[in-house]
Image (cartoon, grey):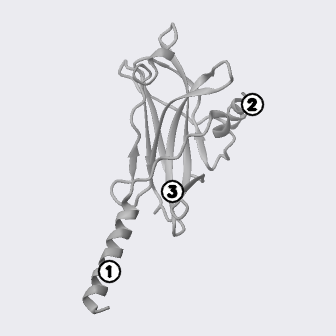
Amino acid sequence: MNKINLTILSLITLVGSIAANAVPVPAPDAPSLANALKLPQTHAVVFRPTRMAADARLNLAHIRMGDGSVKPGNRRGVMLVVYSSEADLNGNHSIYAQDFHFFSNEGSPVTNFPSFTPRTAAPSAIDSQGRLGIIAILIGFNHNTRTNTFSFAPLPPNDTLSAELTPGDGSVSLLLPAVQKVRAAAARL
């Protein structure tokens, strides 16, 4: 093989490798509420269960403070899952919304999850008082790029969260992480 053919073959291999890495990776499946509540505290932040007005908004932002370093062949990400606080007849909790983002050292360190509004996300689940009970959980994930598999992973300890409820009347209230006793009780559901 001459140098030109070898160079062309090397370029084709490089372009193919870049294209393979650029293929979008589907988000991991959200765990059931029961399984999410069993995750270690380092892997998930469980927010205090709340009842939202139909037109209220839940806004959550994740602020990356660390450099996001992981072992080669791995990528870290975070998923927000909004579950129903009411179980169905089989004891399952519906997932009203979920959104997954990989961490990146490029661009803004702030990940703003899409706003959650009961009237838009779960209009048929709003009760007669115009409210919807939710449990929001932020879950850390690791993506093994070699095997294309996801596993639960600790959330970076130095990162910051901002979670607020906007009731629709101009006021804003913070949605706080649940204390361990509430989390343990919810896990027994």
Q: Where in the figure is residue 30, as x and y percent of width and height?
A: 56, 40
Circle 3 is placed at which residue position? Answer: 76
Q: Report the residue at 48% width, 44% height from top.
A: 161
What distance separates the C-alpha of mark 2 from that of mark 1? 59 Å
> Three-letter amino acid code at disc 1?
Leu
The label shown at residue 9 is 1
Q: Where in the figure is residue 165, as x and y percent of width and height?
A: 45, 28
Is disc 3 placed on a helix, strand or loop?
Answer: strand
> Three-letter amino acid code at disc 3?
Arg
* Horizontal arrangement in the rendering, residue 36 relative to residue 73 (left or right): right
Q: Where in the figure is residue 126, as x and y percent of width and height?
A: 49, 14
Q: Report the residue at 65% width, 35% height from top.
A: 179
Closer mark to the observer between disc 2 and disc 1: 1
* Relative to 32, residue 7 above or below: below
Is disc 2 placed on a helix, strand or loop?
Answer: loop
* Horizontal arrangement in the rendering, residue 30 relative to residue 117 (left or right): right
- Spot the residue most to the top: 128
Q: Report the residue at 56% width, 45% height from top.
A: 139
Is disc 1 placed on a helix, strand or loop?
Answer: helix
* Relative to 82, residue 130 above or below: above
